[in-house]
Amino acid sequence: MTSQTLTHKMRTRAAAMLGASLLAVAAVSLSGVSSAAFAQDAQAEGRQFDAKSGEAVNNAQTMAGAGDNLGAVNALKAALNLPDLNPYERSTMYQMLGQYSYELDRAGEAQQYFENAISAGGLLPNEVDNIKVVIAQLMIGNGQYREGAQRLENYLNSGGQQKPQYVDLLVNAWVQAEDYNRALPWAEKWFNAASPKERKHFDLLNFLYNNLGMQGRQADIVKEMIGRWPEDKTLWDAWASMLANGGREQEAFEVTKMLYLGGALNDEADLLKVVQYYSFYEMPFQAAEILEREMNANRISRTPDKLKQLSGLYRQAREYKRAIPILESAASQSGDAKLYADLGEALYNEGECKRSETAFTEAINRGYDAGKSWMLIANCRYDQTNNLDRLNCEMTDAQMAEAPITRARASAIEAFERVPSSSRERRNAQKWVQFINAEKQAVDRRCEFERNVERELCYQKIKQAYDAEIFTGGFKLDDANCTKFKADYDSEFRVKITEE
């Protein structure tokens, strides 16, 4: 229940109660005004009109009865100037002036006339009490919430009749004065006395407990309301909010999820709250599916921001293939550099380096960080080496230089070197270049070592073949693979023997 709703209801009730109260006051005040009133009834001594004042009052009544409230007001004002009016006559005339002024929408004047009626001193205690209630109602209806509420509360606390409508008006007046602490005890009294209890009784307590931060009591009242009106989504929303505000987010999520699965959530804000809950509780795939489903159903707008959110959820769930077309759509709609970069990253994670490089290039052209972009482009190029044949020591230097893996490494190095020197990524890029070069150097060292080991073994076999010539009748090399090393062996060792 909002403050504006309370204002409207309060004014409506105040007007209805005020009209009834004015009729009651008028009936009591004018009970002695009749043709028999001039008989000076001893039992009503001091509470009767003389001939002139009685005639003036009767004329005013006649005018008002004919709808001439202004004429009645003027006639009563003139009658107040009659000599020797007693307190009862004055009090009655002022009450009538108050009533007719109210009918003329002169609430301020009506209030003053009723004040004068009390001050004139011609009323009985119960009549004074009635007029005090009328004055309080006038003040509340005229926007003097605190003053009117205080007067009405004083009346009720001093033994005045606590009619439900008075308590209702008092509560709403304190609410309009934003004094919720003063409103609460009367609201609880009104609630407890109500039979049967209607929605307005629950709404008011819910409103007050919420504004006073009384979450425990509010939870109790909302629970009871849900039991009575389970179809009311606003109650479930309030319950979920209370759970969340009370640190019970998981329970709030369960309530929201139940509402969604039950078809109770339809507007975009509520549906996005469901998506956020699933994302918060580390269920990005479910969050993405809900968001995409509701976008396809046109219940969530398909804006670049929402597409970005959807693609982010799919990427968080490592569903890059599903994120890619969404990112493409979002990037093309918005032209946002970050979205192109996100698209490049998604394509990178799918190993689509060429498309990734195209997206990153577009991101760079639109102002995105070139350092980050070239780092991912270079990493994607390097990652491709994992799917290529490795270099082996059986290959010649020319074969190694033309191998696909060598070209891929060179391409990666070229990308790493394009990271701007001003970028924070530059240092990492240089480390990557060193690492890739070190890989090639490691292959070279390994092959060199393997060739040295093979040469040494063949040198031993060649020497043994020379040593055995006397027994074999000539040079006979058993291992044909060692033939390629014989010329080197001869040039290094056999020349020296000849010289000796």
Image (cartoon, grey):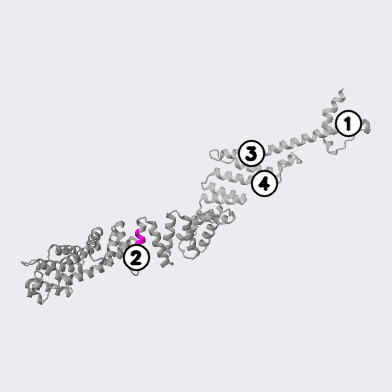
| Residue of label 1 | 466
- SS for dot 1: helix
Quick one: label 1 or label 2, which is nearer the N terminus?
2
Quick one: label 1 or label 4, which is nearer the N terminus?
4
Q: Residue furthest top?
A: 500
Inter-mark Cα distance, 4 to 3: 15 Å
| Residue of label 3 | 435
Q: Residue type at mark 1?
A: Tyr
Inter-mark Cα distance, 1 to 2: 117 Å
Q: Residue type at mark 3?
A: Phe
Regarding residue 173, the answer to whether it shows in the image is yes
Residues shaded magenta: 201-208
Inter-mark Cα distance, 1 to 3: 46 Å
Quadrant assignment for the N terminus = bottom left
Quick one: label 4 or label 2, which is nearer the N terminus?
2
Q: Could you say which quadrant of the image residue 22 lies in? A: bottom left
Quick one: label 4 or label 3, which is nearer the N terminus?
4
Q: Could you say which quadrant of the image residue 149 lies in? A: bottom left
| Residue of label 4 | 386
Q: Label 4: how many residues lie within 10 Å, few (<14), some (14-19) or many (20+)?
A: few
Quick one: label 1 or label 3, which is nearer the N terminus?
3
